[in-house]
Image (tube, rainbow, N blue to C red):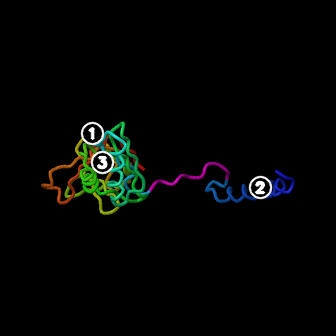
Amino acid sequence: MNHLSLRRYLYVFPIMALLLSLAHPSGALGALPTQRPEAGMLEVTVQVDGLSCPFCAYGLEKKLKKVENVADLSIQVDQGRAVLTPEVGTSLDLEELEKAVRDGGFTPHGITLIARGRLTEFNGVPALELPNDTVLLLSDNAETSALLESGSGAVVRVEGQATLESKDGHTGHPYTLSISAFEID
């Protein structure tokens, strides 16, 4: 670093430190507050039966990239799964996702997801409301009961298994989420 660059650095650094301290709510330097992620699906993992080679993975990847709102995906051949990251603040259509796997010549075996949304009720059944008019019904288990104690309208981060239920009585929302872990925001 030459003399002029060092001098500029020593002049600019205190000014930047002052601006950062003024921008921080406490008026002191330190960690800036972290922003919560937007509501939506954060990660979706599909177990895929029959996935055994890189060439097969490439074909599946092409099909999954066509699913609306997919920002990133990773095909893990050795573990027989596809891990998808939706675009920020969106949800994936799980029926469309399973169809893409079947169209790729494979059998979807299970879907796990991590999502952030608002607790609500749908036809009297506890549910998680996500963007894109997505509502996942919540299965009746201990985690769901504990989560519901926080009250309707609470924003939560959940992890669980999405299962396709019989469409009877679900009025267009055939997936039920069995929560395995949650965090209240």
Residue 104, how many percent across, how many down? Answer: 27, 51
SS assignment at label 1: helix
SS assignment at label 2: helix
Q: Earlier in the sequence, mark 1 or mark 3?
A: 1
Q: Amino acid at mark 2?
A: Pro
Please rate how many residues cluster around mark 2, counting C-alpha atoms within 10 Å: few if below 14, some from 14 to 19, many from 20: few
Q: Is residue 89 above or below residue 178?
A: below
Residue 52 visible in the picture: yes
Which residue of the protein is positioned furthest toward the top in this rendering? 78
Q: Amino acid at mark 1?
A: Ala
- Determine contact: label 3, label 2, CB under 8 Å: no
**Disc nearest the viewer among 2 and 1:** 2
Q: Earlier in the sequence, mark 3 or mark 2?
A: 2
Disc 2: which residue: 14
Residue for point 67% across, 57% down: 20
Disc 1: which residue: 142
Which residue of the protein is positioned furthest toward the left in this rendering? 168
Magenta extent: 28-37
Residue 126 visible in the picture: no
- Report the disc number at residue 148: 3
Question: Is residue 74 or residue 59 the one in the foreground?
Answer: 59
Whole-Å distance between the Cαs marked 1 and 3? 10 Å
Question: Is residue 67 or residue 16 the one in the foreground?
Answer: 67
Q: Is residue 3 above or below residue 50?
A: below
Residue for point 21% across, 49% down: 164
